[in-house]
Amino acid sequence: MVAPVRRAVGWGLLVAGAALVVMISAAVALAAGSVDVALDRVVAVVLRRCGFGGADVTVLEDQLIWQLRMPRVLGALAVGAVLAVCGAVLQALTRNDLADPFLLGVSSGASVGAVTVIVLGAGTVGLAAHTLLPIAAFIGALVALATVLLIASLGGGTTALSPHRTILAGVAVAHLCGAYTSIVTLMRGEGDAARRVLSWTLGSLAGLRWDSAAFLLFVAAIALAWSLAYAQRLDAFTFGETSARSLGIPVTATRWSLMIGTALVTAASVAFAGVIGFVGLVVPHLVRPVVGHRHRAVLPAAALAGGVLLLWADTAARSIVPRQEVPIGALTALIGVPALVWLLARRSRA
Amino acid sequence: MVRRTVFPCALLLAGALLTACAGAPEAESTQAAPSEAFPVTLTNCGHEVVVDTAPERVITLNQGATEVVLALGLDDRLAGTAYLDDAVSQRWADAYAAVPVLAEEYPTHEAILEARPDLVYASYASAFDREVAGDRPALADLGAASYLSPFGCAEEDQRPEPTFDAVWQELTDVATLLGTPERASALIDEQKRTLAEVQESAPGTGLKVLWFDSGDKTPLVGGGTGGPQLILDAVGAENIFGSIERGWGEGSWEDVIAADPDVIVLADASWSTAAEKRTFLEKDPVLQNLSAVKQGALVTVAYSEATPGVRMVDGVTSVADQITALGLTR
């Protein structure tokens, strides 16, 4: 009877610690911006919105903290969580340490959609570019995904959707999409189109408002719940497909449903935040040495670490250079690469 | 065996061809009667421009250069133009329609040579890339003088501060090269009068203005040194991003909300239209609460009227008229 109680207490502490980390990170991020707002004002704004006092909060403070910065903070947490969870799932599923959420061509397909809107213009459809962009990116991602799955399952049989076929198909589609985006950007780009395409490709959480942030949070919740439902099967996959099959796991069905599932949630986050690299690749590797290899622990830990990492990266992205945003995709690589190198060095010593 | 004999033969043939080649033919030198105004010599972006006789076959590249020649009323000298950013101003549209357009963007080097220019005038240094007009000394060897808008000099330290005086200097240079300096002085006098009238009435006095160029996630705004600032200075308004020490720069929506401008100027360019930006501001859940958006104090300016050039005075009158029409109480 003692052990379960102790374990419950341990879990409780862990959850409380995680909540604390998120809250402190969020508070710092909410206080950062080109207009100075003191930390206690940030707390006052949030408390007032949650129904606790704060009658002295000005309209300006509320607009800055609650309407501009809060959606961005929540969006960062959600996108980071989605990418890290998908990375963890795909790394287990393909038994490939280099697998990331963009394995199935989602990022390159989304770029095709985005470039089409940015360069060729949105006016033709009668919608403004900023509304059309996420939709086009999402559709592009779905088309690329379908193409990759089609190529990877050509011929059917047990090799359908096998890890190395899937990776090859992803690479092929990515190159095809890359050709389209370069040709369109360089040959049809006007004004600052090339700059806008590049900045979209490096991802940005700027411009997120409550509607999109709420949607992203919803996506993140689904991603976590969905993958947790598969946690045990993923554990089995890490020992290889043969052992997974011998444990009675429907290997092909699991592969299909997880690959499509991760691609869909990734596409949803890419649609709003662009292509933010490295979070999905590195974060799972960072959390496994800490929480072990059981996916029941890896997935929530990856969600937390990914979200917090992206939140800090985003806060840095908008504060390092005054009045200018550093592309967040570049920052995650700047943070992620040393982390990965450190990890590799440590692992080879062990 | 065959291959062994073919190779030396080919080599011989090639050698024979090479020795038989003559040099390039001499460029035809046009011997027009030299008037007293010529030769004209001036230094432009570190390049010595020499014109012996009044150029008759001018090629203009980029919209700014084209409009300067049109504004001087010298469209009969144009042998070709290329590369508009948006549309040529309505007042010169008829004259422009009669000029051959060599290409939608930059023409190829061959297309330029084919037009036999005696002066190539461009707004941006990229026009003198090898695959376009070719570099300026090479053009001079071909008998074509060249002029690059000082604002477009490749070396940053050769570019003048963007001021009306610098714009007028370019007009004077070009008119002088074309042998009609009096047209420049007439045009400049007219622009000075217009500018003085607006400065006199100063309809923007006491108003805080955001110059919204493009972008949605972060706005690209008019900064403190450039066309937007010159226009806002002329109408007497205050630029909320005047502290950015560039013509255009990244602003932030936070600063916009904190400043809550009285008027927002929307730049109208083909790649980012004013209508698009208006819709964006009106739809955004946060920005729709800006006073200027709520009161519809949105003013539109063509992009080419806000870049230092011959149309900037039109930008000034346009902004001034629209602000006056808003009838804001200060």
Image (cartoon, coloured by chain):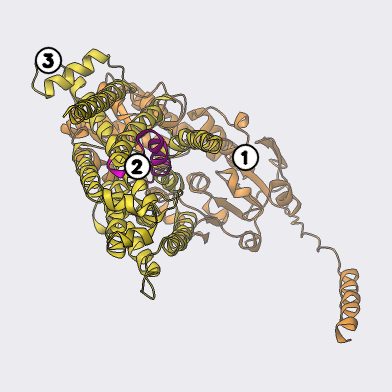
Chain colours: A yellow, B orange
Where residue A113 sits in the image (x, y, percent)? 35, 56
Q: Secondary structure at mark 1?
A: helix
Residue lying furthest bottom: B2
Do tag 3 and tag 2 residues touch (Cβ < 8 Å)?
no
Disc 2 packing (10 Å; few <14; some 14–19; many ≥20)? many
Residue A293 vs A241, above or below: the answer is: above
Chain containing the residue with disc 3? A
Q: Would you name the residue on which mark 3 appears?
A: A54
Where residue A125 sits in the image (x, y, percent)? 25, 58
Where residue B126 sits in the image (x, y, percent)? 59, 47
Query: Which amino acid, mark 3?
Result: Gly
Q: Would you name the residue on which mark 2 appears?
A: A84
Q: Are marks 2 and 1 on the same chain?
A: no
| Magenta-colored span | A273-296
- Decide if residue B3 is in sight here: yes
Q: Nearer the viewer, mark 3 or mark 2?
A: 2
Left or right: A83 as drawn, with respect to B101: left
Disc 3 packing (10 Å; few <14; some 14–19; many ≥20)? some
Disc 1 packing (10 Å; few <14; some 14–19; many ≥20)? many
Chain containing the residue with disc 2? A
- Decide if residue A122 is in sight here: no
